[in-house]
Amino acid sequence: MGRKAYIKISKYRPSLFQGKLDFSTSKGVSLTHEHPLERLLQHALLGALVFLACLYLYFVTATVLNVIAREDAISRVARIEGSIGALEQRHFALSQSVDASSAHTVGLTEVSRTSYVYRPGNVGAATIARNEI
């Protein structure tokens, strides 16, 4: 049965050159006419692309400006810390009134036992990573 059925089917099989593609407008699909929503969709996609490009540029610029402001703040903090130490030293030198009796009023205490600790490496140092973009 398999052989006869195959012969019978192959008898009615069209050749390669007998097929055709139907692109008529009766089915609602046409490659020659523009769909009514096609232009609207094209403008919407172009607008979304421009919006996303602007958003990308905004975030890149904001990140760069944030890193620059952070570096500036770190340098200003270091400069202010140095000036505070110098001002305290100058204040104590000019006041000449710090002695053992007035030391307790400014928060100074006498050191009774001194112990020095050595820590290998930077265990207690807080450092800030550079160029962390």
Image (cartoon, rainbow, N blue to C red):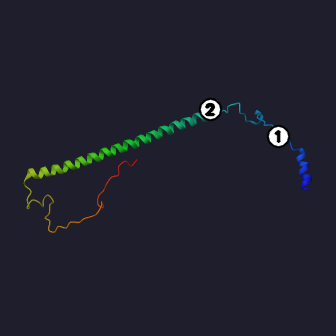
Residue extending furthest toward the front:
120
Find residue 16 and name its label.
Answer: 1
In this view, the residue in front, 56 or 48, is 56
Outermost top residue: 33
Q: Is 125 above or below relative to 84?
A: below
Above or below residue 100? Residue 73 is: above
- The secondary element bearing badge 2 is classed as helix
Few, some or many residues within 10 Å of mark 1 (<14, 14–19, 20+): few
Residue 43 relative to residue 69: left or right: right
Task: Give the image quarter of residue 115.
Answer: bottom left
- Residue 65 x, y percent position in the rendering: 37, 41
Q: Residue placed at 25% from the left, 48% from the top?
A: 78
- 130 to the left or right of 48: left
Q: Report the front residue among 121 and 106.
A: 121
Vertical placement of residue 114 versus 9, above or below: below
Q: CA distance from mark 1 to mark 2?
A: 38 Å
For the point 22% across and 50% down, the residue is 81
State the image coordinates of residue 100 (x, y, percent, origin top left).
8, 61
Q: Which residue is located at x 41 percent, y 40 percent?
A: 61
Residue at 14%, 52% (x, y): give it. 89
The residue pinned by badge 2 equals 39
Residue type highlighted by circle 2: Arg
The quadrant of the image that shows the N terminus is bottom right
